[in-house]
Amino acid sequence: MGQSVSAAKLRSRPDWNHRQRSKPKSTALICPMQAEETEELERSNTDESSDFISDLPDECLACIFLSLSPADRKRCSLVCRQWLLIEGQSRHRLSLNAQSDLQPLIPSIFSRFDAVTKLALKCDRRSVSIGDEALVLISERCRNLTRLKLRACRDLTDAGMLAFAKNCKGLKKLSCGSCAFGAKGMNAVLDNCPALEELSVKRLRGITDGAAAEPIGPGVAAAALKTICLKELYNGQCFGPLIIGAKNLKSLKLFRCSGDWDKLFPLIVERVAGMVEIHMERIQVSDVGLAAISNCSKLEILHLVKTPECTNAGLGAVAEKCNLLRKLHIDGWKANRIGDQGLIAVAKSCTNLQELVLIGVNPTKLSLEMLASNCPNLERLALCGSDTVGDAEISCIAVKCIALKKLCIKNCPVSDHGMEALASGCPNLVKVKVKKCRGVTSEGADWLRSTRGSLVVNLDINLDIGEHLDASASDGGAQDNGIEFPPMVGSQIGASSIASSSTGRSTSFKLLGLMSGRSFVACTLRRLASSSRS
């Protein structure tokens, strides 16, 4: 019936642990020495099954949540009350479907997410959007808001924007598109938000067209503004006082804004001489405006997209004075107003050029050779929709562009001979993208890949008849024909649910980068949580 001490000691520890877990524990027939060993094993078993994750400080859990995807964060919030609380308090970025039925949910939403500083309110074009009352209610609960994005909020008025601006004076970034408020609402923000640094306005329906338009700005925000982006405005020039008053403005982007900008640019440049980036797309500007822009001696980035009145003379004026130019994008719209002459002027003066995108422009070997020789830092080059860029021009690039890393060729008369030239040139070339060049075959691309094993070659020989070559970035995003840039991604969910991308990763969480990614972290959390409840 009983067991001797020696027999008990002969039993291995794993077997003993297994027996302890599988049978009721009893020490009635065990000597004192066995009892001590049993207590030690019980303590060991207790330690193994203890809830380690409960010992983590809330700050550590918050850092982990910051690395998870929105879907994983939602799952984690269902584990327990503690996780629900921490997940809500650690969320700083929130995106809501801004339909009218959102208003009753605002108190409960922002009671849970009480640390939100970046908010997106987006409404479907076919739905009724939130109104002034809802926006004011949000502003009362999010007084620390620094970023606000409004999309298709058609029921917001000037009065609502005024009340919001008074409650959220720390706003640093405002982006609004397809909203119904007008100049008074915009001026309310500019008059009450002295920390505003970025302003993006697209299709603001409440702005009056014509001479009766109320001027916008400058307001107290003008001193802090660094970026202004205006898109598809019938009378974008009513923002003239704001642009002129923004003395610290670094980036100005104008997309399809009607009006004569030649009259405004001299006034802008006279007051704002420190601009680093200017992006113009389908606006009325000519060499007069470019001559004014040339006085921005700190200019580093210039985009001229579908501005047919700009010629070689205007580009030459900019190149002569703006010697710090690093990125130049030109979409000549097949107007043949900008060509070798303007590009040679760039080559002579802008030796710091790193990125050049030419669309609908017809450069020849003459200008390309000078650009390659005089711009030793040229790393990214895109040639799209050009009738003059053939094998000879590609051979010139291969020989001269020593620093080139990325090359994009689209809809140009290039053949496999051009690919052969690239095989022995451009020693730093990392990626080549060839699209809709009739003379380049898959065999030629395969040969280039095999010759230079480390070179990434993307070939698209799809030749859709009637396809219109439109390489412009209508919203300032990546160009299909140009150098590849990371896309901007957004998310949105239903009216009664919440979606957001998590806030930027904190410095402390970078230590978790040693793990194998977000999915690993999420699985680990779920496993620990389930073990703690079992």
Image (cartoon, rainbow, N blue to C red):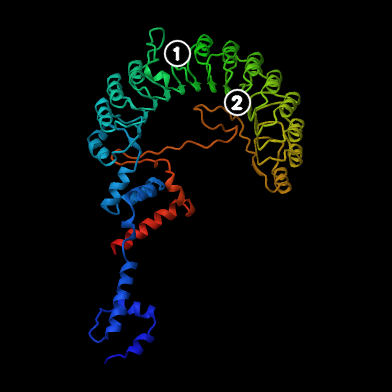
The alpha-carbon separation of the residues under discs 2 and 1 comes to 25 Å
**Callout 1 crowding tier (Cα within 10 Å): few <14, some 14–19, many ≥20:** some
User: As rendered, which of 510 and 328 lies closer to the eye?
Assistant: 510
SS at circle 2: strand
| Quarter of the image where the C terminus is located | bottom left
User: As rendered, which of 356 and 494 lies closer to the eye?
Assistant: 356
Q: Which mark is residue 240?
A: 1
Q: Residue furthest top?
A: 211
> From the viewer's perspective, is residue 66 above or below residue 132?
below
Residue 426 location in percent, x, y?
A: 72, 38
Give the amino acid type for the residue marked by disc 2 in the picture: His
> From the viewer's perspective, is residue 206 above or below residue 515?
above
Tag 2 residue: 329
Give the amino acid type for the residue marked by disc 1 in the picture: Gly
Q: Are marks 2 and 1 in contact (CB under 8 Å)?
A: no
Q: Is residue 349 visible?
A: yes
